Amino acid sequence: MKYRIINKDMTKYELQKKSKEEVIAFIRERLSLNKYIENLRHVNVDDFKKEHLRFNMTGYDIPHNLMVLNMFADIGIYGYTSYLFLSFYKGNGTLYLKYFYEDIGQEFDFSEYGTVEIIFQIFQKTICSNKTEIGERKQQF
């Protein structure tokens, strides 16, 4: 499957207007390792271009997983929640989050998802949701 390279610096408003396939391509491009290719020798460049950063799903590499998630912080994934934390245990991922202006935290099971799909789901639950972002006024009726 070929992915069209798109702008790695899209805003959340641009992403909200894109199709699922275009958002997936954006995520893959953000996670790509292409910037390291020129420094490697004895590597099949075409195969390497298909690789990207992935979550370590063993549960033992929290700093790496946080670094991967923080690659999307500039888009605003943290702007909708009091906390947003991704945890793995033996390959099973769980997202914990609590939206601003809500009293109860939520958790979502990502056992069957890969890195790109997990990030896409996080987009769906944050920047593409109808939840209130920090700084926006909650309207009271």
Image: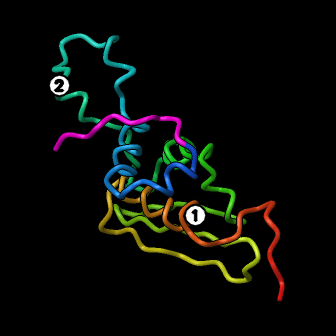
Magenta residues, as a range? Answer: 1-10
Point out residue 67 in the picture as x, y percentages from the top left corner.
54, 41
Badge 2 amino acid: Asp
Secondary structure of the residue carrying tag 2 is helix
Q: Is residue 3 above or below residue 39?
A: below
Point out residue 139 in the picture as x, y percentages from the top left corner.
81, 78
Q: Residue at x 42, y 58 (%)?
A: 120
Badge 1 amino acid: Thr
Q: Residue at x 42, y 64 (%)?
A: 93
In the displayed structure image, the side of residue 134 where residue 90 appears, left or right:
left
User: Where on the picture, by quarter, is residue 78?
Assistant: bottom right
Q: Which residue is mark 2?
A: 46
Inspect the magenta stretch and tell me whether residue 2 lies in it.
Answer: yes
Secondary structure of the residue carrying tag 1 is loop
Q: Which residue is mark 1?
A: 126
Q: Is residue 95 above or below residue 15?
A: below
Tag count in the figure? Answer: 2
**Quadrant where the N terminus lies?**
top left
User: Where on the picture, by quarter, is residue 79?
Assistant: bottom right
Which of 9/34 is in front?
9
Point out residue 37 in the picture as x, y percentages from the top left corner.
31, 18
Point out residue 53 in the picture as x, y percentages from the top left corner.
38, 39
Q: Residues within 10 Å of mark 1 (few under 14, many from 20)?
A: many
Task: Identify the mark nearer the N-term, 1 or 2.
Answer: 2
Inspect the magenta stretch and tell me whether residue 76 lies in it.
Answer: no
